[in-house]
């Protein structure tokens, strides 16, 4: 599985480089209007000279420039002025772009079974899947999945670029890989107003086997995994219709239940993008009662009208064609710009030995609370045993009771080297509600985070806040060290930053003097506040494992969401 994924990444990177250098070019010419050669040349000339985000060969650039050399200066100036208008950009897009739904991958990037030609020898009575998005594929795909589960070893089921309509649940039994197009987009979609649940069930899988979902796009389709092992990578999840009343948006676009990924040595969920517009306000990922689940290098929320930052901040190593494919989907499917309407990015409960690393949690500020509908923290972590939350970028949740990184009732927690923009870190012990919870919070390290306070400087839920709101429970060995607080506004050093609330055992809360305000010389330690009694700073710094010391805080320069009045 690891070698296959590396091969696919190499192919995609190679093909992206070829498009840039001129070896491979795909054009999609819409027949909506007929253009003369001179008009086409002028369009190409403007695109090339202004470096519009479409790849063209260098040789074509020279040729086109030569052809356009006869245009006089006035014509060129008029063309450039028109090009800069949004309406003309849209016109250019309609005539010249890569059609990611109609891209052919090289043979080396295909799998064992091509769903559009699953039975070339006519020996297994398998029907081909339709990739136009016009016909229901549920029965054909279920038959292919059932056939693949009966083979020995791992069967790679390949989905060529296209749109695959499904109308009911799909169930997979056995060791398989579902793999989409490397260069194109392989999209699972539903009927107009349905948000369906694609259920992945495992039966009879040998030890150390797992199901792999790679490079697939899901529009209105949820994935649910129960039992055994799973990995998901390079996928995109969104919903482009009004969800049905039964969509269970609070259950997540990906749901992982009772999974033990011990020994897999790959993240359960990585390099994927989760999007929701205001019609689908809900949860991205729900992980419950699982072991060794790693969630890393994912993006939760984007303004699709403002993703140029991805070129500089992520480069092409993250996913070479991700930005271009997102732009294509936005235009082709008329997606709304604001795709950051998250109740929560991750619900994480009753899990052991897990990690949430290097993700971008980018919620939209355009959400307005409406009655009982409210945000429920950037991530909500509870009843954990050994959990790392490190090197993440977090913004878009308010510094109040509905925001922040919330962790409660568990032990063995590290929150380190995160960039936390205008929301807080909330540590609680709650009373039992519903399923019994461990009534303690033990062995917690909050280290090296960069916390920005802008909306409510000095507010309890803008900084680091510990609380036992109901009664006195067990808090043991909580360490706060090396955190930096960037506080906007007047007199930042007058603001409190770390709050220890009621019922806390102050002897178990170790706040070190290397928690500082940003920009003070020499570094000035922050103010701390205890609800009951007095808590003194401890000298020096905590003894922190070298792995956390070596980590870096992600300081991405991510564009702000457009205000709701002007977003798509």
Image (cartoon, rainbow, N blue to C red):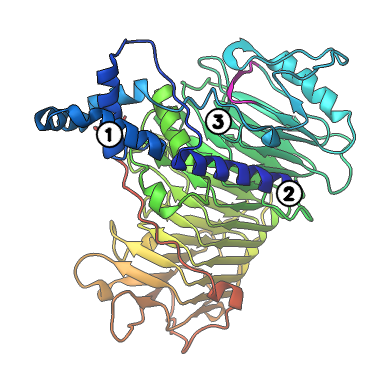
The segment highlighted magenta reads 160-167
Circle 3 is placed at which residue position? 184
Q: Quadrant of the C terminus?
A: top left
Residue 253, x across and y down, in percent: 58, 35
Mark 2 against mark 1, which lies toward the viewer? 1
Residue 184, x across and y down, in percent: 55, 30
Note whether 130 is above or below 358 in the view shown. above
Query: Please, what secondary structure does the residue beneath circle 1 have?
Result: helix
- The residue drawn where x is 28% and y is 56% is 455
Circle 1 is placed at which residue position? 65
- The residue drawn where x is 63% and y is 61% is 387
Circle 2 is placed at which residue position? 3
Residue 409, x across and y down, in percent: 61, 59
Q: Is residue 165 magenta?
A: yes
Q: Quadrant of residue 252?
A: top right
- The residue drawn where x is 37% and y is 55% is 399
Query: Please, what secondary structure does the residue beneath circle 2 have?
Result: helix
Crowding near the residue tagged with mark 3, few <14, some 14–19, many ≥20 C-alpha atoms within 10 Å: many
Q: Quadrant of residue 459?
A: bottom left
Mark 3 against mark 1, which lies toward the viewer? 1
């Amino acid at each position: 599985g690891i070698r296959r994924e590396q091969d696919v990444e190499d192919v995609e990177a190679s093909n992206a480089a070829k498009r840039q250098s001129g070896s491979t070019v795909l054009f999609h010419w819409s027949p909506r209007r007929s253009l003369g050669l001179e008009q086409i040349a002028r369009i190409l000339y403007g695109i090339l000279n202004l470096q519009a985000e479409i790849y063209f060969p260098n040789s074509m650039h020279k040729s086109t420039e030569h052809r356009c050399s006869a245009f006089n200066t006035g014509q060129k100036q008029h063309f450039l002025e028109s090009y800069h208008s949004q309406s003309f950009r849209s016109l250019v897009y309609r005539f010249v772009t890569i059609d990611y739904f109609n891209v052919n991958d090289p043979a080396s990037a295909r799998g064992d079974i091509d769903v559009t030609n699953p039975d070339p020898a006519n020996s297994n009575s398998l029907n081909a899947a339709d990739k136009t998005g016009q016909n229901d594929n549920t029965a054909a795909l279920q038959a292919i999945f059932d056939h693949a589960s009966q083979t020995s070893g791992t069967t790679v089921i390949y989905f060529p670029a296209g749109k695959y309509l499904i109308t009911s649940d799909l169930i997979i039994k056995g060791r398989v890989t579902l793999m989409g197009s490397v260069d194109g987009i392989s999209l699972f979609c539903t009927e107009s107003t349905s948000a369906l649940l694609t259920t992945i069930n495992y039966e009879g899988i040998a030890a150390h086997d797992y199901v792999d979902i790679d490079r697939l796009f899901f529009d209105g389709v949820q994935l649910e995994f129960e039992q055994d092992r799973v990995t998901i990578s390079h996928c995109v999840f969104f919903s482009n219709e009004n969800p049905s009343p039964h969509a269970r948006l609070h259950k997540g676009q990906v749901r992982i239940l009772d999974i033990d990924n011990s020994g897999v040595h790959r993240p359960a969920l990585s390099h994927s993008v989760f999007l929701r517009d205001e019609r689908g306000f809900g949860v991205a990922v729900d992980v419950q009662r699982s072991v060794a689940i790693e969630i890393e290098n994912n993006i939760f929320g984007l303004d699709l009208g403002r993703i140029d930052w991805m070129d500089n901040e992520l480069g092409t190593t993250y996913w070479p064609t991700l930005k271009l494919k997102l732009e294509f989907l936005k235009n082709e499917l008329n997606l709304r710009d604001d795709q950051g309407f998250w109740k929560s990015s991750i619900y994480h409960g009753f899990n052991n030995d897990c990690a949430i690393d290097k993700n971008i949690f980018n919620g939209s500020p355009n959400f307005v609370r409406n009655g009982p509908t409210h945000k429920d923290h950037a991530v909500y972590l509870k009843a954990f045993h050994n959990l790392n939350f490190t090197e993440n970028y977090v913004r878009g949740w308010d510094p109040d009771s509905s925001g922040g990184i919330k962790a409660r009732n568990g032990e063995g927690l590290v929150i380190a080297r995160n960039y936390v923009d205008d929301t807080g870190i909330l540590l609680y012990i709650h009373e039992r509600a519903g399923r019994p919870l461990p009534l303690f919070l033990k062995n917690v390290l909050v280290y090296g985070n960069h916390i920005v306070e802008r909306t409510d400087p000095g507010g309890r839920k803008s900084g680091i806040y510990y609380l036992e709101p109901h009664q006195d429970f067990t808090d043991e060995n909580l360490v706060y060290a090396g955190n930096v607080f960037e506080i906007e506004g007047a007199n930042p050093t007058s603001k409190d930053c770390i709050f220890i609330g009621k019922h806390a055992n102050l002897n178990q809360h170790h706040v070190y003097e290397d928690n500082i305000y940003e920009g003070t010389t020499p570094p000035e330690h922050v103010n701390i506040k205890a609800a009951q009694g007095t808590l003194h700073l401890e000298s020096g710094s905590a003894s922190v494992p070298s792995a956390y010391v070596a980590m870096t805080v992600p300081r991405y320069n991510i564009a702000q969401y457009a205000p709701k009045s002007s977003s798509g």
